[in-house]
Amino acid sequence: GLAGDPEVGRWLVAAGWFCHGLWDLAHLTLERLKGVVAPSFAEWCAVVDVLVGAELSLLG
């Protein structure tokens, strides 16, 4: 069986996707992270991460 409530798990996974989207934006804005990842990839990944996080949050 499951170790926890599936609803809580969904919210935790959604939060992880959102946080990863913020991390991708950090690659675009923080000077020390520039050049680690190609800007086009960080932008694309940020959009995908936020959209997946939003979908998981709105899923009901």
Image: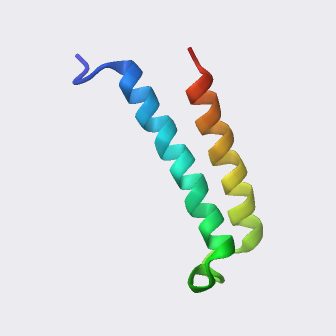
Q: Which of the two residues, 42 or 60, is positioned nearer the viewer here?
A: 60
Identify the residue at horizontal 22%, vertical 24% (top origin).
3
Residue 55 vertical position relative to residue 38 in the rendered view, above or below: above
Residue 33 vertical position relative to residue 54 in the rendered view, above or below: below
Identify the residue at horizontal 45%, vertical 37% (top origin).
13
Q: Quadrant of the N terminus?
A: top left
Name the spot of residue 21 as percent of width and height, x first: 60, 53
* Left or right, 44 with reference to 6: right
Name the spot of residue 28 as percent of width and height, x first: 69, 72
Query: What is the number of callouts on the image?
Result: 0
Q: Quadrant of the C terminus?
A: top right
Name the spot of residue 20 as percent of width and height, x first: 54, 54
* Left or right, 2 with reference to 29: left
Identify the residue at horizontal 48%, vertical 41% (top origin).
15
Identify the residue at horizontal 74%, vertical 56% (top origin).
44
Name the spot of residue 56 as percent of width and height, x first: 57, 28
Q: Residue furthest front?
A: 30
The answer to which quarter of the image holds residue 25 is bottom right
Residue 8 vertical position relative to residue 17 in the rendered view, above or below: above
| Colouring mode (rainbow / by chain / secondary structure / one colour) | rainbow
Residue 60 vertical position relative to residue 36 in the rendered view, above or below: above
The answer to which quarter of the image holds residue 54 is top right
